[in-house]
Image (cartoon, rainbow, N blue to C red):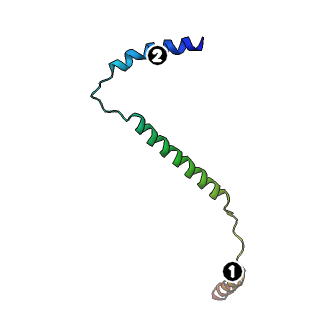
Amino acid sequence: MPDMSAHLALTQLVPLAEELDKNKVTPGVLGFVVFAVLALAVWALMKSMNRHMNSISFEEAPDPAEPGKAGKAGEKTKAAS
């Protein structure tokens, strides 16, 4: 039964193929292959970027030299006011 529906679909598509202009340039198989390769490359880059972004810790660790500087800066501002 599936073979019959495929045959019916092909018989309906044959007149459409004959209506195409033979002088018209189309991308063809090479265009599809190039597009598919570009799509796969973008997908791979997005997956890699997502993996790298997930490995980054956005929580900042306190800098050991920072509290001493902040304390001195706070003392200077208190003295100035």
Disc 2: which residue: 10
Q: Return the residue nearer the eye: 75 or 25.
A: 25
Instruction: Say whether residue 65 is left or right of residue 25.
Output: right
Residue at figure coordinates x 62%, y 53% from the top left: 50
User: What is the quadrant of residue 69 in the picture?
Assistant: bottom right
Q: Is 29 situated left or right of 53 in this image?
A: left
| 2 and 1 marks in contact (CB < 8 Å) | no
Local packing at callout 1 (Cα closer than 10 Å; few below 14, some 14-19, many 20+) is few
Q: Is residue 11 above or below residue 46?
A: above
Residue 65 in percent (x, y) is at 70, 82
Name the residue rendered at 49%, 15% in the picture: 9
Residue 10: x and y, percent?
Answer: 46, 16
- Image quadrant holding the N terminus, namely top right
Q: Is residue 79 above or below residue 19?
A: below
For residue 6, side relative to residue 73 (left or right) = left
Q: Residue 76 in the image: state x and y as whole percent.
A: 65, 87
Callout 2, which amino acid? Leu
The residue pinned by badge 1 equals 66
User: Which of 26 and 1 lies nearest the eye of the viewer?
Assistant: 1
